[in-house]
Amino acid sequence: MLRRQCVARTSTEMHMEVSSVRTGPMMELQSYPPWIQDIVAECNDARRGVVEHECFQLMRDGALSPHAMRMFLAGAWPVIEQFPQYMAMNLLKVQYGFAPGHEMARKYLIRNIRVEQNHVEYWTDWAQAHGLSEEELFFGRRSTSAEALSHWCWHTCERDPLPVAMAATNYAIEGATGEWAALVCSSADYESGFKPEARKRAMQWLRVHAQYDDKHPWQALEIIATLVGKHATARDISGIESSIRKSYEYMRMMFDDCLVHEQCSSTARIQKRAMTG
Ligand code: FE
């Protein structure tokens, strides 16, 4: 019986199960070593600053201005477009058989580079549904914070150790993105702002990222924990924690900048009203 089960699985899957540090269900934080549970708890406020951002509350309600929407779609574009390249840089760090976690990282990165290819195309469809030309999306003006987010991702994936770089991108950015996409999709208001025939294409990117059972960030967390092991050094912990925090903070700064124009125009409206009595 046991032998038949072994034959049914690939050797890579068997190896992954043997070498992982996970002790319970994949999508429960208690299944992972205490050091990584502490990091997740420490970064929780920074994560909430992203996933509950006013930008997404307005988007969900169909109340985000066209200007802010364009800032958002063009601002996030470099990270969307470069995401497979971040993973490719991390793939270069993997050496089969070198240490626990490397086989898991290899399989995850190779598979998900293919998946991210489709997401680039869904993003261009989303931008098009808001009237952004390819010229604007690819080469238009972006906020400094939007550029900073993509520079940070590129830098960490090029220079930092595998668990640190995967924490910044595959865990923090993908995880938070799934949560804010779910917030936007939690009401029909945003979707119903599109003409019925445009809805499917316009919403495809959000739909695929809003799946509540998205395993990708959990798989990334498992890989990070397994690469480092049950007992992390102080340097491992501070490197991973600060990379997760930086990704959240750069994201929040970018989303803040999408709303700057609305806040300025609402302040100007209030001042004008006060002046005209
Ligand atoms: Fe994606």
Image (cartoon, rainbow, N blue to C red):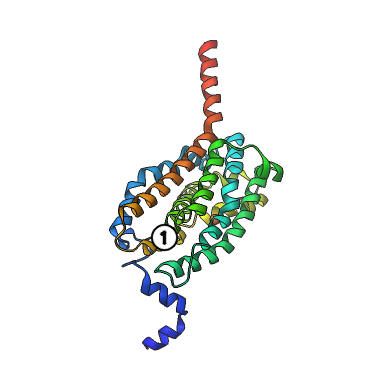
> Front-most of 162 and 8?
162
Query: Which kind of residue does numbered mark 1 sit on?
Result: Trp
Q: In this view, does 181 lie to the left or right of 142?
A: left
Q: Position of residue 42 (x, y in %)?
A: 32, 47
Residue 118, relative to residue 8: is it above or below?
Answer: above
Count of picture labels: 1
| Local SS, label 1 | helix
Q: In this view, does 142 lie to the left or right of 55?
A: right
- As rendered, which of 159 and 103 lies closer to the eye? 159
Question: Alpha-carbon neighbours of circle 1 within 10 Å: few (<14), some, or many (≥20)?
Answer: some
Observer-nearest of 170 and 237: 237
User: Which quarter of the picture shows residue 171?
Assistant: bottom left
Q: 160 or 220, which is in the foreground? A: 160
Quarter of the displayed picture in which ligand 1 can be seen: bottom right
Q: Mark 1 points at which residue?
A: 218
Q: Which residue is drawn at 67% across and 45% down?
A: 138
Q: Name the residue at 36% across, 61% down.
A: 228
Q: Where is residue 239 in the image (x, y as percent from the top left)?
A: 38, 50
Residue at point 44% right, 75% down? 13
Residue 11 place in picture, x, y as percent = 45, 79
Give the position of the N terminus as an image quadrant: bottom left
Please say whether residue 27 is visible from this viewpoint: no
The correct choice, above or below, for 16 with respect to 269 in the image is: below
Q: Is residue 15 above or below residue 216?
A: below
Question: Is 213 placed left or right of 75 in the picture?
Answer: left
